[in-house]
Amino acid sequence: MQTIEELKGLSAKAGKGKIWGDQQIPRLLKVKGKVLYNDNFADLKNWHHEGGGKLTQPEKNVLQLNCIGSRQGRAGCMAFCRKDFPDNICIEYDMKVISSKGLVITFIAAQGRNGEDMITELPAREGIFADYIYNPRMRSYHVSVSRYNDKGEHTAVSNWRRNPGIFMMGQQEDLCEEIGKWYHITIIKKAGLLQLAVNGKLAGGFNDLEEIPEEIPQTGKIGFRSIGAEVIAQIKNFKVTALN
């Protein structure tokens, strides 16, 4: 198992512009399996908060992440589903960002590097980004959407990353640009193939080329992070379905 220093060295040697995934991906995979989990947010008992800000329910069946007065890289408002999910899944939810001086991140297959439950079996985290991207005890993929800087300027891109090491796996157009609009998000994970669709349109993704000397993230938790000077994001209709 590589140390964080070794992984950072590998990334630095490859250069800042290195993309570690093949972005020539197939059309959005079809989902044929059974629903594994469905959450209409009647309450938040199935969601674990960590970091800054707070989780609220401004209306029935809505989870709201409130990150106010932070900045990118610092403590974000985090919500992780307490359930662990298998590989070969389709994740769906509706998202609306109502205030954005920052961005929203979805974590996929977040788990201890030795298979630990990241909530109950790993040390508590403070919610700063390094707790997830350079944590020597954790691995995950993540993707950023509605990606604004702390000044409220849209960056135009959406990034896929692999952790630990925050390796850039793919970069694509950010289709979640409009504030105050509901978007239907679909994320496919099939081993090292990950895809993102927004309102049914394939936004991008990647095939992990497995050039990183570390086991790829496979199973684990799904979570959300709102981070920036002022990011208020709402989530509803969260569902996870088996691909086959």
Image (cartoon, rainbow, N blue to C red):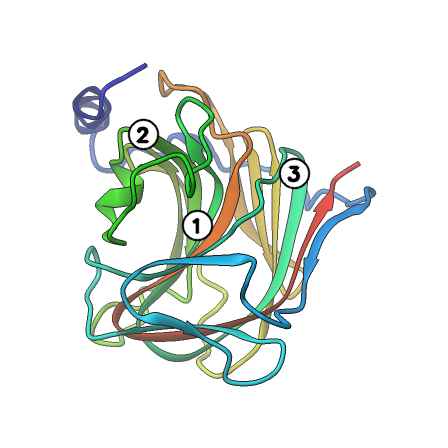
Q: Secondary structure at mark 1?
A: strand
Is residue 176 toward the left or the right of residue 72 in the image? right
Q: Are marks 2 and 3 in contact (CB under 8 Å)?
A: no
Vertical comparison of 110 with 210: above or below: below
Q: How far is the residue under mark 2 from the one under mark 3?
A: 32 Å
* Residue 18: % across, % down: 29, 33
Is residue 163 toward the left or the right of residue 12 in the image? right
Q: How far is the residue under mark 3 from the one under mark 1?
A: 18 Å
Question: Disc 2 residue type?
Answer: Arg
Q: Are marks 1 and 2 in contact (CB under 8 Å)?
A: no
* Residue 144: % across, % down: 40, 55
Q: How far is the residue under mark 1 from the one under mark 2?
A: 20 Å
Residue under numbered circle 3: 26
Question: Disc 1 residue type?
Answer: Val
**Residue in the image at 64% along x and 72% along y:** 42
Sequence-wise, the earlier of marks 1 and 2 is 2
Sequence-wise, the earlier of marks 3 and 1 is 3
Q: Quadrant of residue 197?
A: bottom right
Residue under numbered circle 1: 143
The image shows a total of numbered marks equal to 3
Is residue 17 toward the left or the right of residue 42 in the image? left
Q: Secondary structure at mark 3?
A: loop
182, 70: nearer the viewer: 70
- Mark 3 neighbour density, 10 Å: few (under 14) some (14–19) many (20 or more): few
Q: Are marks 3 and 1 in contact (CB under 8 Å)?
A: no
* Residue 139: % across, % down: 39, 32
Question: Disc 3 residue type?
Answer: Pro
Point out the frontmost of discs 3 and 1.
1
Residue under numbered circle 2: 137
